Structure formats: C-alpha cells, structure tokens
Amino acid sequence: APLIEASDFFAEASRQIYSVILEISTRNDAVNQITVSHELARRGQLEGLGGTAYLSQIIADLPTPLIVEHYARLVRRDAGYRQLISTAQQIAQIAYRADDPDVSNVLAQAQGLLSSLIEREQTSQQTTRDLKGDIEEYLAVPRFGVTGVRLGFPSLDFTHP
C-alpha cells in the first residue's frame, strides 16, 4: 500500500479491486478472495469486473505473494511512464497552442508539469526507503531470542540465534 495507489493501475478493473483491498485493509479486516468478493458484490461491482472467476484468475496468475513488492514496483514504474507520456502530451498541447508570445512562459509551464512529476517520483522513492528501513528494523528486533524470518522449513529459515 505505501508504494502504489489505485490510480497507478492501467486497467479500471484493477483500480477498483485495489481500492476495495485498501478499504478492507484500512478497516483491519482480513484481505482475501472472500472478503474482496463480498465487498465488490455489496457495491454491485463484482459481476462487472468479471466475477469471482476473474478474482480467482488474478490469484492463480500471481506466482507467489513473497515478491509482492516487486510487482508493486512494476505497477508504479509503468504508472510513472504513463504519467510522463501524459505530461509530454500536455506540454505539446501548450506548445501547439502558442497563444503566449513569450516562450519563457510556456517553458515555465512545462517545467512546472515536469517538476510535479519528479517530486512524485522522489516521494515514492523516499517511501520505499522508509518502508525498507521499517522492515529491516522489525527483522533486527529479537523475538523469542531469535532474529530473522522463520518460514517453517528449517533448510530455508533465515535466522540468527
């Protein structure tokens, strides 16, 4: 959730599903296929988004939730590219209108649009750094005398006694 927003998704169905996931999470309810399906159905959106079959397909297509941050970064990256394209189109429209005789005013508008885009990306990168720091701090605190992550498989457990 700290890495992406619903608007970062390209597909409207993905935006709606992610919005519901965020809302369920905000209520501190369990986020799973059942709760998401129920909430979408309650809103009258489930069938329009493809029903429970579509939600099942999304889950089946996700190889593992362990690398969810990687997928979130891909969504964020692609959203950034779409925003850059949109900003470039806005700048082109400003230039094509050419209703301002002073080119420096047009350049200032273009710079303002690009600055907003750069600021959002920098904020996103800082959020990622903060999130990584929080995770590292959490993992560094001994729990029951052990630091690290217990996966339940001794050969895979990454722990420090």
Image: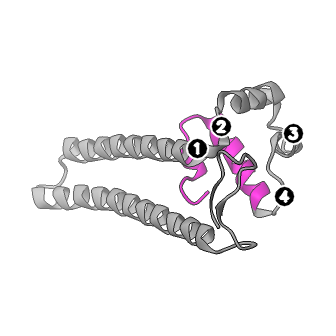
Label 4 Cα neighbours within 10 Å, binned few <14 / some 14-19 / many ≥20: few
What residue does disc 4 label? 29
Q: Please say if the residues under marks 3 and 1 sit with CB atoms less than 8 Å apart.
A: no
- The three-letter amino acid code for the residue at tag 1 is Ile
Q: In this view, does 85 lie to the left or right of 37?
A: left
Q: What element carries label 1?
A: helix
Verify whether residue 149 appears in magenta: no
Side of 21 where 116 appears, left or right:
left
| Residue position for label 2 | 64
Does 8 sit left or right of 37 as displayed?
Answer: left
- Disc 4 marks a residue whose amino acid type is Asp
Viewport quadrant of the N terminus: bottom right
Find residue 41 and name its label: 3
> Of residues 134 and 104, which is closer to you in this image?
134
Residue 67 is labelled as 1
* Measured Cα–Cα span from mark 2 to mark 1: 6 Å
Mark 1 Cα shell of 10 Å, populated few (<14), some (14-19), many (≥20): few
- Mark 3 crowd level (few <14, some 14–19, many ≥20, 10 Å Cα): some
Q: How far apart are marks 2 and 3 (CA)?
A: 26 Å
The image position of residue 136, as x and y in percent, is: 54, 67
Please name whichever residue, 48 or 19, is drawn nearer the observer in this view of the structure: 19
Instruction: Say what secondary structure mark 2 lies in.
Output: loop
